[in-house]
Image (spheres, rainbow, N blue to C red):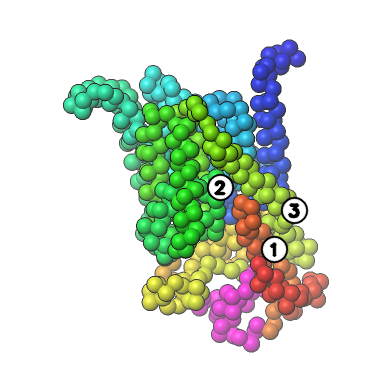
Amino acid sequence: MKLLGQLTKGQRAEWIVWMLFIGVLLFAMYVHEPWFDEIQAWFIAQDAPWKDLLFVLPHYEGHPPFFHLLLAIPARLGISGTLGLPLVGALFSIASAYLIIFKSPFPRVARLTLPFSYFLFYQYSVIVRPYNILVFLMCLLAVYFPQKDKRPGLFVGLLAALCACHLYGIAIAGGIALAWLWEMKGPRTWKTYFCNLGRDRRFHWLLGLLGWAILLLVWIFPRPDTFAMGSEFQTTPLWQRLIYLLFIMPADAFITDIFFVDQRLSVFPLGNWLPLLSGVLVGLCVWGSLWVCLSKKARPFLYATYLGMSLILAYYMWQHHIGLAAVLFLFVLWIGWKSPSKCPVYLKAFYALLLFVPLGWTSATLFSEATQPQLSGKPLVDFLQTHQLQDKRIFITWWQVKPQDIPDTHKAVYPNGLTNTHYLPLATTLNFYAPRNLFANFNTATPYRYNMHQARTQAQDEQTLQAWNQGPLPDLFIGTDQLNTILQDRPEEKQNYAIVFRIEGHKKWKFDKTSKMFLPVYARLELLEPHHLAPQDTLFFYLKLIQG
């Protein structure tokens, strides 16, 4: 007890909050049902042949294989995904929270609240992705930043680990390296600097880091048939994306909700001038408040890392990447914290907003996850097992954009819409609680349960659809529009199916933006009586679908 008292002396609040963080995180992970990208990573770690995991899939997944290798430890030891997946994420997130609470230079109120903020706690802790590791490494880099000149091998080693974590880790590490090179120059002339650079061991370490980053970029460079690179269209002009990244994303990371749809920035309509203007104004306030607290020496690290990351985000950014701005600001403030000498009331109020609005987002999201059904395969698996349907011929909806949903700028290129019969993300999600692949039209040539992010030619899709049209009809089908596609040559068969189950899902975003999904499960009429199935109210289902 005496030792415990010595450990907690003067830091009792910190220890209590850290233990509270662990408890809330474990609860949140218990009620959270994994999303597609979490399950995709787990199935790759569990199912993929080592050759594919190391040398094929990185070209399609967009990041080096080290996250998958880490997940492979529990996955291939036989630990279930419901335990192994959150366990890996929790280890890194708990360590990150410890570093923020005990090691960061911020005022106590900031140190005790930051680990619970929306992006750090929910998007990059509860949801298990490579960003859990990225946040931990950024915290470690901040801790060892003062020692980087005396221990360059350690610091560059952490940067190398950050590169191995994700493509965005490579961009951030590159920005830190460039700012460090600028710092090395100091007051010397450029001629003196370059003449002595070759004798600086820090430079030698950074050359090694450059070689490592190039190797990783070659390792993950997208192949021509990578799905995200060739089969989607971009409708948001580049200048709007850059305005968003440079001015609005800092606001969205802490206060506003301009980019609120779970899709890529390149297809999100940012054309309305009013939200753009308001977002820019709030973003400038965020930049200004950051400037007040940031030492002059740390500013190059902010500029280099943020601009480097934005170059990638301009071409490939999803909604959850907004939190990378919060992570970068945390890092640069950590390494260059300067307490404002005079802080007016209005600035204190703005700082309070930056801290406490994300706490509200976290609370709203956790309440939603604890009280509303998430899109999960468990209810479906239970339903199939209860009615002994797991061995039936089950088809599931695939990726498709209808012709009417194609933007006018691309209708000439895609007059028949966009289809990829090979890409079935819902199959991966719903397979998570099943002992094997449940779906007859998913990965038919392999036993794997992950999706290949691989584009298909129109001829390949037409061939696949023709084979399905000519083959045996599905006993069950999950989805609506694609059932009509399969039965397009046999329209009379539509009346032989009835909705027997509904999959419902909710996904919360910040305060009030919730994605809702209602998926019908159709069964052939002849299965109803033998398997004790009751037809559902079709009208009720479509009303719910419209409301969602």
Amino acid at the residue labelled 3:
Thr
Which residue, given by chain and number where applicable, does mark 1 sit on? 504
Q: How far apart are marks 3 and 1 (CA)?
A: 13 Å
Look at the numbered disc 3 and give the secondary structure of its residue.
helix
In the rendered image, the vertical position of residue 131 relative to residue 206, given as above or below: below
Q: Upstream in the sequence, badge 1 or badge 2?
A: 2
Q: Distance between the residues labelled 2 and 3?
A: 25 Å
Span highlighted in magenta in the image:
465-494
Please state which of residues 22 and 333 is positioned toward the viewer in this rendering. Answer: 333
Residue 31 image offset from top left, x and y in percent: 71, 48
Q: Which residue lies furthest to the top in this view?
A: 2
- The residue carrying pointer 2 sits among few (fewer than 14), some (14 to 19) or many (20 or more) residues within 10 Å by Cα, namely many
Query: Is 481 inside the magenta-drawn segment?
Result: yes
Which residue, given by chain and number where applicable, does mark 2 sit on? 255
Residue 407 image offset from top left, x and y in percent: 44, 72
Residue at position x 40%, y 72% in the image? 410
The circle on residue 371 is: 3
